[in-house]
Amino acid sequence: MDGYLGSWSFVAEYCLYVFIAVIGMLQLIAARWELRGISFFGNKGWGYAFGAAAIAAVFIWFFRFTGLDLAQPTFDTPPQLFWLAVSTFLAVAVTLAISSIANHKRMPSATDDDNEGIDTLRRQTYWRSISKYFKGRAR
Amino acid sequence: MISADETVFFWINGLAGRVAVIDDIIRTLSCDLFVPVVMILAMVGLWFVGHNREQRENNQRAVFCSLAGMGFANLVVYILNAALEDRLRPFEAFPAQVNLIFYPPTDPSFPSNATAAAFAMAIGVWLYNRKLGYVLLIPAIAIAFGRMYMGVHYPLDIVGGFLAAIVGVAIARLVLKYTEPVPTKIIMLMRKIYLA
């Protein structure tokens, strides 16, 4: 990984940029579509504020404060797509983990066993949903 | 045709280098590090939203079509690059006259790969979700205009990239159609684990 934009520090900054932006996007979605199970907050307003602020801040940080010089070559397409995908999946996983912890007490376990996909996350956390799914399979 | 292409190019590229802030904004909006992230945010959003299950499933198919379309559009560009004689970039053909305000890419000028990828993603979404599709055409148009403004592509390269995007998305649609029920099974599997 030689050269300015092929350096590991650039890869780390790029991954952080994508990671925070995707987390912000997921919080906006959680607020707008009332997916309380993936929200970090009990209040929709905080979700909107956090999501918008995270996306705006990370774009400004990446393009203005990382010393990025767009007159220099950027990633080749394959490594860029690789790090983009890795950061995106990691952001989804971290969102599911943090929201499950944050909502553990706020959202009591739902009594019904219906699996309605993402809609289930309107009334329970991801951790509770997936645990129930695996318990059901083990039975 | 080539002469008209160069005339339009010089008209657009002649706008560069006058106002530093505008150069900066266009360079940022049309660089490889901005549009793909905007597109991926749109894909994440599209995957999770919908007023009901049917609408969400339609959006998830749009994500498949968009990503596959981008892949096939890149493949079309790769094949064209291999089959056609390399067209020099404007800054290589006219080093003294072009305002180059971007890094100098080393691949052939025709067709524009970045344009093909951005339009393929936008068109892939547009086929399933008109409203978001039109919104995603904005960054695609920004990247197309920006590449000429910055001195790295001629207008015909952009048109070539756009056509490659259409071909790429058409192939993606056919592949998704003929690989059914695989896309549906993937959505069902993701739904089982509460991710679709």
Image (spheres, grey):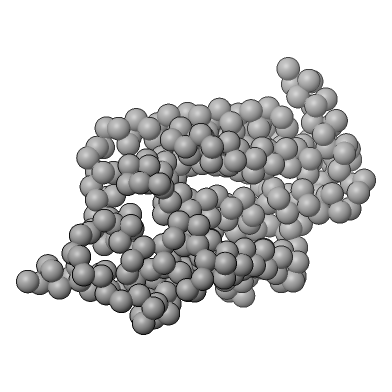
Number of callouts in the render?
A: 0
Along the line of sight, which residue is nearer the eye, B106 or B66? B66
State the residue at coordinates (76%, 57%). A71
Q: Is residue B3 left or right of residue B45?
A: right
* Viewer can see residue B89: no
Q: Is residue A64 left or right of residue B41?
A: right
Q: Position of residue A100 (x, y in %)?
A: 37, 76
State the residue at coordinates (46%, 32%). B127
Q: Identify the residue at the far right of this view.
A: B18
Along the line of sight, which residue is nearer the eye, B148 or A89? A89
Q: Is residue B6 left or right of residue A56?
A: right
State the residue at coordinates (30%, 76%). A108
Along the line of sight, which residue is nearer the eye, B20 or B78? B20
Q: Position of residue B137 (x, y in %)?
A: 60, 38
Q: Is residue A97 above or below residue B124?
A: below
Location of the C terminus of chain B (image quadrant): bottom left
Q: Position of residue B63 (x, y in %)?
A: 42, 45
Q: Identify the residue at the far left of this view.
A: A139
State the residue at coordinates (77%, 48%). B26
Along the line of sight, which residue is nearer the eye, A90 or B85? A90
Q: Position of residue A78 (x, y in %)?
A: 50, 55
Q: Is residue B77 above or below residue B4?
A: below
- Which image quadrant for residue A24? bottom right
Location of the N terminus of chain B (image quadrant): top right
* Viewer can see residue B36: yes
Q: Identify the residue at the far top of this view.
A: B1
